[in-house]
Image: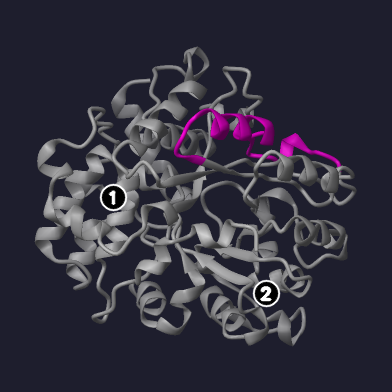
Amino acid sequence: MNRRRFLGLLALAGASLGGCRFYPAEGMSNPCLAQGLPPQLRDHELLRECWEGIDARQFWDCHVHLAGTGDSDSGIWVNPDMRSPWHPIQYTQFRYYLDAACVDGNDLDSLGGVDAAYVERLRHLHRDFPPEARFMLLAFDYYHDGEGRKDARMSAFHVPNSYTQRVAAAYPGFEWIASIHPYREDSVEALAWCARHGARAVKWLPGAMGIDPASPRCDRFYEALVRHDIPLLSHAGKEYAINVEGGQALNNPLRLRRPLEHGVRVIIAHCASLGEYADIDRGEDGPQVDSLSLFHRLAAERRYEGLLYGDLSAVTLVNRERSILERLWGRSEFHGRMINGSDYPLPGIMPLISTRGFVRWGFLAREEAGVLMEVRRYNPLLYDFMLKRRLSIGGVRLPSAVFHSRRIFQHA
């Protein structure tokens, strides 16, 4: 596929991928500079300032997607629609993810070593971090129907627990997070295997996986999570990155009350910062309330102290309005509930973040923006960390504790 056609498809997929306009000022495609940070960036004062007050041993990025095409023995599966130009939205989304992860080629069907290249790129990016820092790699289970049967047609992709565990065990710098559909007949047994093999959490995307977190069908799985002292990292809020086939209602953050009531530690991805949902605390037909307010409602309840957290993955994408960041940074009483996550490879999708936009809003100094944009050309993961460290919103910067995520994933 030639570059002009590829970029045209990228523009076509924009609304679906991000639910927003694109900002191409920083490029449409990841430049994938591969030699690591050059000395002028590696030794830059701004980078040193970003790490001040951070204990690198506690720095665990809790939201790093593992992906590929299944061209190895990984067991990764990708829905054929995502690999077919006849389905241009899904196809272009997948191309974007590979571009962001610096996996390239003229024809997806003829690519060699995509699985290995994806992992090698992550290892390369980690070299610009302190060696004690960790990236938490995410598995991803299939969609299952109400009877607990796998339905590949409804699934966007599948990344097996066994492969994710194997990658994390093979390379320093990685931890791993399992993904298990709770309706599966073997879900409790699968969780026990994952716990024995070092899984730090379980990841759900309810709308895309066909999970209702408020269903009694999940109760035995919640009991097993508590028994193994393993937290649940669950998406909440509107989902745009993959097709959810009408399941957006399952992403209502209030549906996560049920695991909280069972005593499960719950990390709500993205702090549920997109969309509106029915206020089901007032009944299934309750009024529509913005999702971030529902997250803040849960976080304000004292009975959930030590149980409820929100990760900051994707909150700096251009589909977050200025007011979202002002509310996240401005509600300092909830900073202790927030932990860092990147949602990699999304920070590598160049037009999904507008660094200059933060300057226009007064959240970032112009000279800092220039350094950050240059860092991003080499290492989008490091850029994501530095951006969140330097954003000053209403005179407030996030405390160092937000970046000490390891505490949430260690056994009590």
Q: Earlier in the sequence, mark 1 or mark 2?
A: 2
Return the residue at label 1.
383
Side of 6 relative to 191 (left or right): left
Q: Is residue 152 magenta?
A: yes
Side of 3 relative to 296 (left or right): left
Residue 338 on image: x %, y %: 48, 69
Q: Is residue 407 magenta?
A: no
- Residue under the point 39% across and 17% down: 106
Picture quadrant of residue 151: top right
- Residue under the point 35% across and 51% down: 352
Residue 268 on image: x %, y %: 58, 65
Of the 4 image quadrants, the one containing the C terminus is bottom right
- Residue under the point 79% across and 45% down: 192
Q: Classify 10 Å Cα crowding around label 2: few (below 14), some (14-19), many (20 and above).
A: many
Residue range highlighted in magenta: 149-174
**Quick check: can you spot residue 25?**
yes
Q: Classify 10 Å Cα crowding around label 1: few (below 14), some (14-19), many (20 and above).
A: many
In the rendered image, the vertical position of residue 377 relative to residue 214, given as above or below: above
Return the residue at label 2.
254
Query: What secondary structure is found at the residue carrying circle 1?
Result: helix
**Quick check: can you spot residue 142?**
no
Residue 226 on image: x %, y %: 76, 62
Q: Amino acid at mark 1?
A: Tyr
- Residue under the point 70% across and 62% down: 250
Of the 4 image quadrants, the one containing the N terminus is top left
Side of 115 relative to 38 (left or right): right
Residue 128 on image: x %, y %: 29, 40
Q: Nearer the viewer, mark 1 or mark 2?
A: 1
